[in-house]
Image (cartoon, rainbow, N blue to C red):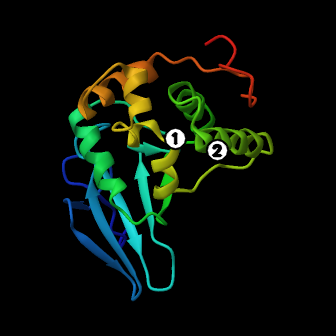
């Protein structure tokens, strides 16, 4: 479209892109909105997230296919090292940052999260809310960076309970094992119920 600038990560072949951006680059939109580009590779080599801030409004980040509510993207063009680095960048954003993700995978992600940490009260509360929300036909986005740090296992690889589930000792090992387990995770069409134990069939 003439006069419209289409932005994407400089290392990704984004169809129609007219401006490639690099990590840390800033773009101003109008008089108020500032967009900071954050290179978050792993799903793709050039994957870029966009952190938006404006005076008087809560900040927001658009994470595409790297961070989902309760989960993360598959490792298509990177490994656990890249995903770990990307999660650390996103974790460093203000806790109140609203997270807008690329897909509605929340319930299945939280089914996996509760298998990883069945005693985590934040996971339990979030999956109950997500199941109810989706049953009403409503989306579960956005979450916040602070919330993701409490229930998303891919942002909790240093936590003893997550490492125990994986049988690992380092963040990189834990990230690799988590993703491998998630890739083979079937999930369930039946809702999780408090006190009901593991999801049926898992």
Residue positioned most to the top = 201
Q: Nearer the viewer, residue 19 or 81?
A: 81
- The kind of secondary structure element at disc 1 is loop
Quadrant of the rendered image containing residue 173: top left
- Up/down of 32 relative to 112, above or below: below
Is 146 placed left or right of 142 in the picture? left
Is 36 placed left or right of 109 in the picture? left
Q: Position of residue 143 (x, y in %)?
A: 55, 55
Q: Position of residue 76 (x, y in %)?
A: 30, 29
Is 43 placed left or right of 181 in the picture? left
Observer able to see residue 199: yes
- The kind of secondary structure element at disc 2 is helix
Reading the image, the residue beneath label 1 is: 70
- Whole-angstrom CA distance, mark 1 to mark 2, is 9 Å
The tag earlier along the polypeptide, 1 or 2, is 1
> Which residue shows up at 57% across the image and 37% down it?
120
Q: Position of residue 126 (x, y in %)?
A: 64, 44
Decide: marks 1, 2 in contact (CB < 8 A)?
A: yes
Quadrant location of the C terminus in the rendered image: top right
> Which residue shows up at 59% across the image and 32% down it?
119
Reading the image, the residue beneath label 2 is: 126
Label 2: how many Cα within 10 Å (few below 14, some 14–19, many 20+) = many
> Which residue shows up at 55% across the image and 33% down it?
109
Quadrant location of the N terminus in the rendered image: bottom left
Q: Position of residue 136 (x, y in %)?
A: 80, 45
Residue positioned most to the right = 136
Is 113 placed left or right of 200 in the picture? left
- Up/down of 172 relative to 7, above or below: above
């Amino acid at each position: 479209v003439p006069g419209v600038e289409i932005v994407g990560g400089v290392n990704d072949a984004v169809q129609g892109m007219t401006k490639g951006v690099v990590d840390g680059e800033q773009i101003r939109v109008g008089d108020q909105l500032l967009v900071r580009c954050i290179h978050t590779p792993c799903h793709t080599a050039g994957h870029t997230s966009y952190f938006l801030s404006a005076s008087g409004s809560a900040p927001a980040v658009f994470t595409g296919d790297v961070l989902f509510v309760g989960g993360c993207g598959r490792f298509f063009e990177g490994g656990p090292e890249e995903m770990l680095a990307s999660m650390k960048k996103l974790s460093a954003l203000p806790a109140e940052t609203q997270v807008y993700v690329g897909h509605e995978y929340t319930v299945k992600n939280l089914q996996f999260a509760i298998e990883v940490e069945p005693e985590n009260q934040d996971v339990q509360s979030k999956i109950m809310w997500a199941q109810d929300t989706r049953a009403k036909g409503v989306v579960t986005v956005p979450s916040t960076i602070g919330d993701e740090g409490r229930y998303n296992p891919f942002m909790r690889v240093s936590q003893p309970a997550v490492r125990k589930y994986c049988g690992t000792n380092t963040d990189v090992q834990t990230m690799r094992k988590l993703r491998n387990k998630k890739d083979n995770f079937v999930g369930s069409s039946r809702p999780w119920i408090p006190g009901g134990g593991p999801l049926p069939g898992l």
